Amino acid sequence: MNPESRTARLLGPPARGRFKRAGVVASLALVMASGVVGPATPADLTPSDRTAAAPDGSDGCRPHRPCRGPRGATGPAGPQGPPGQTGATGVTGATGPQGETGPVGPTGPCVGIDAAQESADFEIRLALTGGRTYAGIRDQRAGEQQTLLWTDLSARPDYPAGGAAGLPCDVTVNAHNRSETVKRIKFDVITTTGQVWEAACVAFTTTHPATLNCADRTGRPKPWILVARQPTPDALNGGA
């Protein structure tokens, strides 16, 4: 009987398998010792080699398992999209509470006018505008142009121009129809402080057209005067 066959029967199937594996290991050790290098085994490949390429030319990825490659460069930004549509206008909110009343503003400039006609020959006007007082006369006689001729009474002495006297805020005319040639006329103003001031003039009909003269006999302009007794609260045929 062959000695090897006898040995194999004595050892049994498990023993024969161990001998075969031992023989494979011994043969592989001899090949490596002799310097013969065959194709690289999976143990000889680095992780990158195993991922990049497999011996059979595939991409090295295991079946049914995803492989992640290196991240690529960031691409350019895409074009800007179209603007969105304008939304609907919202509902109007409730009206807020009324604010407090503001302070009273400064008094505006006063204006006024008055007129009188006590003669068929002429008529009189008194106008207040821009803080100045003007007396006017218009000749009504036939052949005259019947235009108003104005005299600035603000240039007369003591014209109320502020301070305690206040500023003129309304005007009035006092004329009297008399048969004499010289017609005396009084022009009055009331100021913002409640004072009453007066200027006296005469109307001359000896001239053509008729004119006003507000000077005294020496030719000096007649001043404005604060009338005697001023209106006061609760006055009864009196005043201050």
Image (spheres, rainbow, N blue to C red):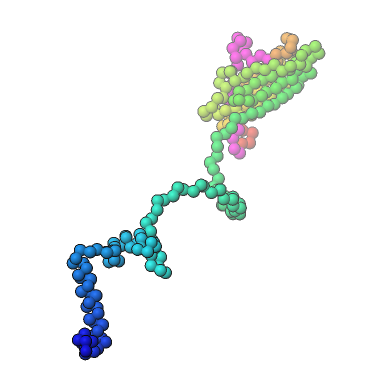
Q: Does 123 sit above or below residue 97?
A: above
Q: Is residue 227 magenta?
A: yes
Q: Residue at x 64, y 33 (%)?
A: 237
Q: Residue at x 20, y 74 (%)?
A: 26
| 100 and 96: which is toward the camera | 96
Percent position of residue 153, x then y: 62, 19
Q: Main secondary structure of the magenta part?
A: loop
Q: Which residues are magenta?
A: 212-234
| 137 and 79: which is toward the camera | 79
Percent position of residue 142, x then y: 81, 13
| 184 and 191: which is toward the camera | 191
| 13 and 88: which is toward the camera | 13
The quadrant in which residue 179 appears is top right
The quadrant in which residue 218 appears is top right
Q: Residue at x 64, y 28 (%)?
A: 111
Q: Is residue 228 magenta?
A: yes
